[in-house]
Image (spheres, rainbow, N blue to C red):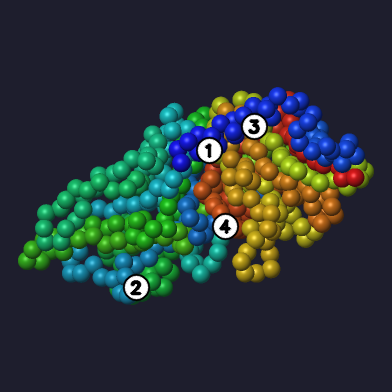
Amino acid sequence: MKYIKQDLLTLLISLFVLSACNKNDQLGLDVSSEDQIELKLIDTATIRTTTVKEDTVITSGLSQHPLGLLRDPLIGDTESKLAMALNLPGSNTYTFGTSPVLDSAVLVLKYGDEFYGDSVNSHYTVEVRQLAEKYNTLNSYSNQKTWSANAAVIGSKSLTKFAIHDSVKVTQIVKGKGDVIKNTAPHLRIPISNAFVNSNFINAASSDLANTTAFQKFIKGLYLTVKTQAGERGGIAFFNLAQADSSRLEIYYRNVSTTIDTNVAKFGVTNATTAANITHTYTTAVQTQLSNPSQQFSTVYAQPMAGLRTKVIFPYLNKLKELANITVNKAQLIVQIEGGTDAALPAAPRLTLYRTDIAGQRRELPDRDLAQVQGTYGDQRYLTPAAFGGFYDATKKQYVFTITSYIQDLLSGRSVQYATYLSPLKSTVSSSQNDPSDIMPSATTAARSVLGGGSGTYKMKLNIIYTKLK
């Protein structure tokens, strides 16, 4: 058997050598010039771009809430303030017991996963006030909601940075035992005025602490703002209030009786009962585009937190139809950032790209519209997020979107072009499933991008590789 295998191997090698001696034109199939398929590239398709205002966004119930003041030299100022309701430690009546004596109180807010701004040369002061109007936990609030708050500051904290990655050592109260020091997840601790706590908690009427409804009507809520020093860039920090019991107003007190022990009452703060009021003041360059939405601009802007989005139009795409039937093999939109605009603040790690319909409603591109197992929507040509693109390439300083199906549908008449938009997206949003949030305005990131538009040095490009059918 060994010799048979060697003979077969020798025969195969000989055939291979003999085949290699043949001329190249003797290999493969003969194809006539009429039947050949030729791929062609267009990389000069005209693109029109301008910056327009982003839609408002509901900020109550966010997965993480923004707080801070950011001065962007290229775009302008962004300020985010937080209004929040407090919940009783339990769903029923709470009492501080007999002869309570206040030790201290602190507002604890768990950090989210992002800080965007200056963490080196800026100084921050977080201030807490009492709302002058009730935070209605049954309502949804948008970024445009302005809140009425009392003038008196009831708590403050000065910071050189928002330490979103640093654990915090805290003293944990153990009933009937000695207190212990523990490492806890990164969070912000803001001391609250004893006078405020004594008046509104320790000495509150029993009827005001009878249930959650009565308590929230009485206390109304808290309002947080951030100050920075003049000329400093500042920044926006995010707080994750979604995790139960991770954020709260902690009140430490003692009851004087036969023994004295320290107690803690925790009045919870949640993402469902917190809303952000976000305002923007724009530079002249940005405001010029907002005032002239029909003009073409070589520099455009994409800013989250109900800020700015880039409107993209391919005005002469239909001219490809003049070449007869076209099959799009691949289409990519290449988006460069303007040179140097990531020096002051880094470019957004991810952008989203979506279209609108005749009613102006946002729609996924077919390349990103996941075909559902159940239901009537979706597209079988769906690409994964990695294949669709939109993630920032820090080396090439660009974003790339694969939009083959979208361009094919426009050329075939299956879709009508109304408008396409670029806007920042939280980099963790959406995986392999259809997620409507990836085309909606984002308020859970502050990262922005300054982009090259349809003309200029950093020109946006649409590359189309196509086959002309005969």
**Residue 169 relative to residue 73: left or right:** left
User: Identity of the amino acid at label 1?
Assistant: Leu
The answer to which of marks 3 and 2 sits earlier in the sequence is 3
Disc 1 secondary structure class: strand
The answer to which of marks 4 and 3 sits earlier in the sequence is 3
Check contact, mark 3 vs mark 2: CB within 8 A.
Answer: no
For disc 2, the marked residue is 91
Q: Report the disc number at residue 15.
A: 3
The answer to which of marks 4 and 1 sits earlier in the sequence is 1
How far across and how far down the image is residue 420, in percent?
A: 74, 48
What is the crowding at mark 4: few (fewer than 14 residues within 10 Å), some, or many (at least 20)?
few
User: Identity of the amino acid at label 3?
Assistant: Leu
Q: Report the disc number at residue 6.
A: none
Looking at the picture, tell me which residue is in the foreground, 358 or 122. 358
Disc nearest the viewer among 3 and 2:
3
The answer to which of marks 2 and 1 sits earlier in the sequence is 1
Q: What residue sits 65% from the left and 69% below the top? A: 375
> To which quarter of the image does residue 214 belong?
bottom left
**Residue 333 relative to residue 59: left or right:** right
> To which quarter of the image does residue 281 belong?
top right
Check contact, mark 1 vs mark 3: CB within 8 A.
Answer: no
For disc 1, the marked residue is 70
What is the crowding at mark 2: few (fewer than 14 residues within 10 Å), some, or many (at least 20)?
few
